[in-house]
Image: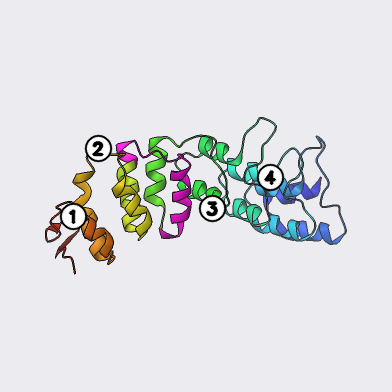
């Protein structure tokens, strides 16, 4: 069918011409599985997908949900478009997969894709492995604080691993999340947490977190020492 060809190649002019002729945008291919919208998402043609959505395409598309195709082939813009149009970030396909499980299987190093799914409330089926958890924490920014806290509270990011704990520590202090910083400093997930106190003092002074600085002083931390991150002395004001 010509519409499927245009959707596959990203020929939006061709798609527009056929739709303007009142061609059924929900028509499926000969296997009765894929629509032009699905094919556009599978091939990462966001503009075509947007036009089809504006003209009656369905983000669910029956058994072959386009979100899975966009995730499987790493098309971030299409994934975001689908999620913006309320595609279910926790839906299942015929094989019992979720968009998140597909992302982790096909693109474990594509942290931006994983973060995108998480921002739209995708729920992991199990805890992230250490490598993925550490990369996630290193790539997350201040806008992801609530998201990261949700992952930690749900034990999807396991702080009993030393590498993960250190990454979570850096994220909490560098992102400016005083609540998370306090939780991490009061936790016992890392047996050598005392080694992190000088760095905690530096970040706390930088962020003007008097409460944390006071607690560090109570623990005997010298807040007048220099840190590797700065030539300036960390002082409690």
Front disc: 3 or 1: 1
| Distance between the alpha carbons at the discs numbered 4 and 3 | 19 Å
Neighbor class of circle 3 (other Cα within 10 Å; few <14, some 14-19, many 20+) is some
Q: Is residue 163 magenta?
A: yes
| Distance between the alpha carbons at the discs numbered 4 and 1 | 56 Å
Q: Which residues are magenta?
A: 142-164
Neighbor class of circle 1 (other Cα within 10 Å; few <14, some 14-19, many 20+) is few
| Distance between the alpha carbons at the discs numbered 3 and 1 | 38 Å
- Point out the tag, 4 or 1, that comes first from the N-terminus: 4
Q: Quick one: 66 or 45, which is closer to the camera?
A: 66
Task: Using the rendered view, name the quadrant where residue 214 is placed.
Answer: bottom left
Front disc: 4 or 1: 1
Residue denoted by label 3: 119
| Distance between the alpha carbons at the discs numbered 3 and 2 | 32 Å
Which residue is the extreme one toward the top? 95
Residue denoted by label 4: 66
Q: Quick one: 38 or 222, which is closer to the camera?
A: 222
Which residue is rendered at x = 48% and y = 42% of the image? Answer: 154
Residue denoted by label 1: 218
Mark 4 lies on a secondary structure that is: helix
Neighbor class of circle 4 (other Cα within 10 Å; few <14, some 14-19, many 20+) is many
Q: Which mark is residue 191?
A: 2
Q: Is residue 231 left or right of residue 114?
A: left
Q: Quick one: 190 or 35, which is closer to the camera?
A: 190
Front disc: 4 or 3: 3
Mark 1 lies on a secondary structure that is: helix
């Amino acid at each position: 069918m010509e519409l499927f060809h245009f959707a596959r190649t990203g020929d939006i002019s061709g798609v527009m011409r056929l739709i303007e002729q009142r061609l059924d945008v929900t028509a499926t291919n000969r296997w009765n599985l894929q629509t032009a919208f699905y094919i556009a998402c599978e091939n990462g043609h966001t503009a075509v997908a947007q036009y089809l959505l504006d003209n009656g395409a369905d983000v669910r598309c029956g058994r072959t949900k386009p979100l899975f195709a966009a995730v499987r082939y790493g098309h971030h813009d299409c994934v975001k478009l689908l999620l913006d149009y309320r595609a279910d970030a926790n839906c299942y396909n015929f094989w019992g997969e979720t968009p998140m499980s597909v992302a982790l299987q096909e693109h474990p190093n594509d942290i931006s894709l994983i973060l995108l799914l998480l921002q739209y409330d995708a729920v992991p089926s199990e805890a992230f492995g250490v490598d993925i958890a550490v990369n996630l924490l290193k790539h997350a920014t201040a806008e992801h604080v609530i998201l990261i806290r949700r992952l930690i509270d749900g034990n999807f990011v396991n702080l009993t691993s030393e590498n993960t704990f250190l990454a979570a520590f850096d994220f909490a202090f560098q992102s400016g999340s005083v609540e998370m910083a306090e939780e991490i400093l009061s936790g016992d997930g890392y047996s050598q947490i005392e080694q992190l106190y000088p760095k905690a003092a530096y970040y706390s002074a930088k962020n003007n977190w008097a409460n944390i600085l006071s607690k560090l002083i109570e623990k005997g931390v010298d807040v007048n020492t220099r840190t590797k991150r700065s030539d300036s002395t960390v002082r409690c004001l």
